[in-house]
Image: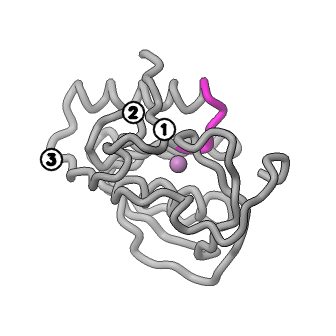
Amino acid sequence: MAIREILTVGHPILRKKAKLVTEIDDRLITLLDDMIETMRASDGVGLAANQVGVLRRVVVIEVEDELFELINPEIVSMEGMQEEVEGCLSNPGFAGYVQRPEKVVVRAYDRTGSLYEYAGEGLIARAFCHEIDHLDGILFIDKVTKEASLDEE
Ligand code: NI
């Protein structure tokens, strides 16, 4: 495993739409492993492949020791609304309030190629939405309603 460089705001890859994964091969497994290591090394809650310069629909999220590896994730349902503070490893030093659904259900493949549905609420729901936005070239700064001080994050 290796820690990869995280691209920061202004890099054009962060604004591109990632492509569907068509094959789970050794390269994709290495990408997942590297993304997990990179996320943990940066104390992040999630990381999308765009952020390490790879335009594939791959996301990793870790909240309270629960690890999600999402390949070709899709939001299949959402419910309610929350407005909480978010940050992003690609926007160091900035935090702001973003509106997200309170609960979401995501469908995605895991590294073995099995299709799963994951229901998440609160922070997990925010992380699902934030990371899937990355795959479409959308950054949380596009959706910030109000800037927050960094210790609110
Ligand atoms: Ni982010």
111 horizontally vs 67: left or right: left
Quadrant for residue 117, please give it: bottom left
Q: What is the three-letter code of the residue carrying label 2? A: Val
Q: Nearer the viewer, mark 1 or mark 3?
A: 1
* Residue 121 location (% of width, % of height): 64, 67
Which badge, 2 or 1, is on the more N-terminal residue?
1
Based on the picture, tell me whether residue 42 belongs to the magenta stretch: yes
Give the position of the N terminus as an image quadrant: top left
Residue drawn at the location 51% of the way across and 24% of the way down? 37
Q: What is the three-letter code of the residue carrying label 1? A: Thr
Residue on which the image places disc 3 = 22
Q: What is the three-letter code of the residue carrying label 3? A: Thr
* Residue 55 location (% of width, % of height): 26, 43
Marks 3 and 2 close (CB-CB < 8 Å): no
Secondary structure beneath dot 2 equals helix
Residue in front for this viewpoint, 21 or 91: 91
Which badge, 3 or 2, is on the more N-terminal residue?
3
* Residue 147 location (% of width, % of height): 72, 61
Q: CA distance from mark 3 to mark 2?
A: 19 Å
Name the outermost residue toward the top.
2
131 horizontally vs 121: left or right: left
Secondary structure beneath dot 1 equals loop
Marks 2 and 1 close (CB-CB < 8 Å): no
Which label was assigned to residue 33?
Answer: none
134 horizontally vs 27: left or right: right
Based on the picture, tell me whether residue 77 belongs to the magenta stretch: no
Residue on which the image places disc 2 = 52
Q: Which residues are magenta?
A: 41-46
